[in-house]
Amino acid sequence: MGATIKDVARQAGVSTATVSRVVNNDHRISPATRQRVLDAVSLLNYKVNTVARSLKSKRTLSVGLIAPEIDNVFFMRVARGVEDRLGEEGYSMIVVNARESELREEAALELLLEKQVDGIIAIPSGSRGDHLALALQARVPLVLVDRLVENFTTDAVLVDNREATYRAITRLATGGHRSFGFIGGQPHIFTARERYQGFIQALRDQGIPPREEHLLFGDFHIESGYHLMKNLMEQPDPPRTVMIANYFMHIGVIRYISFQRGQIPPDLYLAAFDNMEFSAVSSVPSLSIAQPIDQIGRHAAERVLQRIQGDNENWPCIERLPTKEITYNDQHHHQP
Amino acid sequence: MGATIKDVARQAGVSTATVSRVVNNDHRISPATRQRVLDAVSLLNYKVNTVARSLKSKRTLSVGLIAPEIDNVFFMRVARGVEDRLGEEGYSMIVVNARESELREEAALELLLEKQVDGIIAIPSGSRGDHLALALQARVPLVLVDRLVENFTTDAVLVDNREATYRAITRLATGGHRSFGFIGGQPHIFTARERYQGFIQALRDQGIPPREEHLLFGDFHIESGYHLMKNLMEQPDPPRTVMIANYFMHIGVIRYISFQRGQIPPDLYLAAFDNMEFSAVSSVPSLSIAQPIDQIGRHAAERVLQRIQGDNENWPCIERLPTKEITYNDQHHHQP
DNA sequence: CTGAAAGCGCTTACAG
DNA sequence: CTGAAAGCGCTTACAG
């Protein structure tokens, strides 16, 4: 079906080398020849076969993106930033879902390496990274996003979860908040751990003793947020300020509040990691720690492109992007 | 760096043909030879180069996915379904963001064709489809998702927006609802049009005259939902039942309600297209029309795989998947 | 400025 | 059961 470079060469009465040069914008080609080739190209509706090109050139202009979940706001914003930046340089993005499994993550890595991707960006599924070394062995640059892993180091782009949480809690404490609860994730998850550490440290430094029964840990999903909030609010002396360590648990909390309106302390205040569409919806005053998600994606792409270019300066580079605190205190402020 | 089939052949003392056969699980290979090859493979850590393989075999085992927006829950769920099903058959997915532009959509299509993808799945960005014919000309199967386009027909997987809306509104009307408002999208968008038609037709058939000032149209984004709901609710005689034509406008509506609680008619009822994480949050009783989004993605993948297999039976096949109505009336029911 | 030719790493019909 | 060889569609040093 598709015309090949040979067909174009025949049609234009030149060699395939010449056609290749025209297609690749080689300068030293006479205008006349160039035009004849171009005519043949459009006559035959020729499109370059990048598979053949890649075999020769050893570059596929494609980058793999591995994530623990792909139907997830955080992930898709990262993906968007990645695709944006890659697209600007003519690269495309192959997305693989590791479904929270290190095993599948490894399989994904192998698949991508067989596909000869020029680079890989991964949001790690687990806390270990031994298997990720595969990429580097194959000399394919690998950039981590959102989480760091044990036993393996490479470039990474993320935020300082600990510091961001620390700052937010400190700010609230100095602003008069004294009774804190925490709805967190499992400690084997990197971000869950960092956020908890920041929280606890802030309380310590502010001289506020954490109360055991106010520190609850779930699984970063909606239901978990709902139930832990229920647990907190049904205690005889519930915390007045609740820090929620991720967006999905935050949704669960908002859900709980929207149903229990009557039984909620009137001075309840929420602080939550991540700022998404729904962070503004809660009718309870709140503070969100916003990650620059698009930027995380773009920076990761930038980094992988740099390494693909062969620039290995200051590898491994762990880049921590700044977060922002967004407050929803006055209802008239967050009308769109 | 990477060992090639030649290296393996040399190491094992066989021809490259034999190595290829072992790697591809050709049956007629003696166990002894097979073992020697396998040993060489693992010794050299050999991985097949699929670029070379594809050049020979004319198949890349990859499918392109083009969408008007990739940081969007609906899209990502489709993508998830697609990736799931493709993965089962050893195919991978290249994602391209058309950013709501037909021009970029066409560029994306060309890019994917140059990459020699075996098939393409697209959520169209615009209402016209002339440029999509490119794929079919190149004999690459193309499956549409969510929307149909003008001037171009091919396989598609979507829901019956008109019918689903019609049924929901009819059900509410026969249940006693009499005062309907509508928050819709622009009529040039396929889904916006179908949903509006279903709504109007249902009112007609129920003998409820639609009131002009209760029919508002926005742009399918959050802010738009907020403002149109504000407009409706500030009218002297606001509608008691509001149908919202997409999820993002629904979020805007929920936001408005959560801030204006006092000024909302106590008998307000919402009906909305799509059922997502937040559909359950509203404290107003509501009905969601749920699309089987994962299934849409899986079916689209299934269809494109079928066409890749060369099975062209009953092309073009427009598959309309069933929707479900989900009601959130009793607060105790939607506790997770 | 242009072409002949080698070669990228595989697969596969053909022959034995 | 195994190998020699052609060829997939390009690019690119080399020569002119």
Image (spheres, coloured by chain):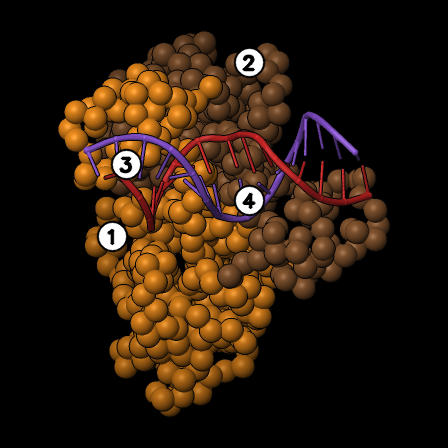
Chain colours: A orange, B brown, C purple, D red
SS under mark 2 = loop
Q: Are dots 2 and 4 on a single chain?
A: yes
Identity of the residue drawn at 45% across and 80% down: A197
Asked whether the beta carbons under mark 2 and mark 3 sit within 8 Å of each other, the answer is no
Image side of residue B14 versus residue A217, left or right: right
**Residue under numbered circle 2:** B315
SS under mark 4 = helix
Q: Which of marks 2 and 4 is nearer the N terminus?
A: 4
The dot on residue A21 is: 3
Three-letter code, disc 4: Thr
Three-letter code, disc 3: Arg
**Residue under numbered circle 1:** A334
Q: Earlier in the sequence, mark 1 or mark 3?
A: 3
Q: Which chain carries label 1?
A: A
Q: State whether residue A321 appears in this view.
A: yes
**Residue under numbered circle 4:** B50
Residue nearest the observer in this picture, A28 or B25: A28
Q: Which chain carries label 4?
A: B
